[in-house]
Amino acid sequence: MEAKGVEGTWAEIDAKEAGNLFRSGVPILDVREDDEWTAGHIPNTSHIPLGQIPDRFGELPLGKILVICRVGGRSARAAAFLAEQHYEAINIAGGILAWELAGFEILDANGGQGTVL
């Protein structure tokens, strides 16, 4: 599905499709706040809170990138911004809650079983 916001156009996919892309090497950017990420996050992903994206998006590899938050609202805003910066941004519909429901791994900051805040 393609969506259009004020900032730009981006794609949106479900968690299962996102998992397939992630396994094939497409990076994930988590835009939740630090406490949310510490409690539970997808292993081997980038973390930049939404409010820091305009100043830090240059840290991300160019090209296709999956974007996730708790339920999909913040990540949609980040995906729209990244699309304007010429990234192929893809929002994960339903966020990390959908990711968890799809049975994918979530870890805490210590490498144990994570919790979604």
Image (spheres, rainbow, N blue to C red):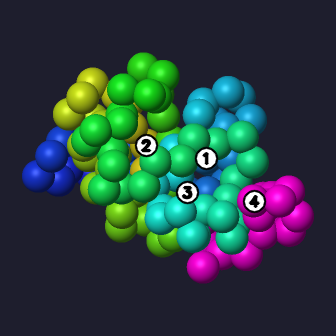
Q: CA distance from mark 3 to mark 4?
A: 25 Å
Specify the amino acid type for callout 2.
Ile
Secondary structure category for the residue under label 2: strand
Q: Which residue position holds label 4?
A: 109
Secondary structure category for the residue under label 3: loop
Q: Residues within 10 Å of mark 1 (few under 14, many from 20)?
A: many
Question: Which region shows up in magenta?
Answer: 96-117
Specify the amino acid type for callout 4.
Ala
Secondary structure category for the residue under label 4: loop
Q: CA distance from mark 2 to mark 4?
A: 25 Å
- Magenta stretch: includes residue 113: yes
Specify the amino acid type for callout 1.
Ala
Specify the amino acid type for callout 3.
Asp
Q: CA distance from mark 3 to mark 1?
A: 6 Å
Instruction: Mark 3 and mark 1 in contact? Answer it, CB < 8 Å.
Output: yes
Q: Which residue position holds label 2?
A: 90
Instruction: Mark 4 and mark 1 in contact? Answer it, CB < 8 Å.
Output: no
Q: Residues within 10 Å of mark 3 (few under 14, many from 20)?
A: some
Q: Which residue position holds label 3?
A: 14
Q: Which residue position holds label 1?
A: 18
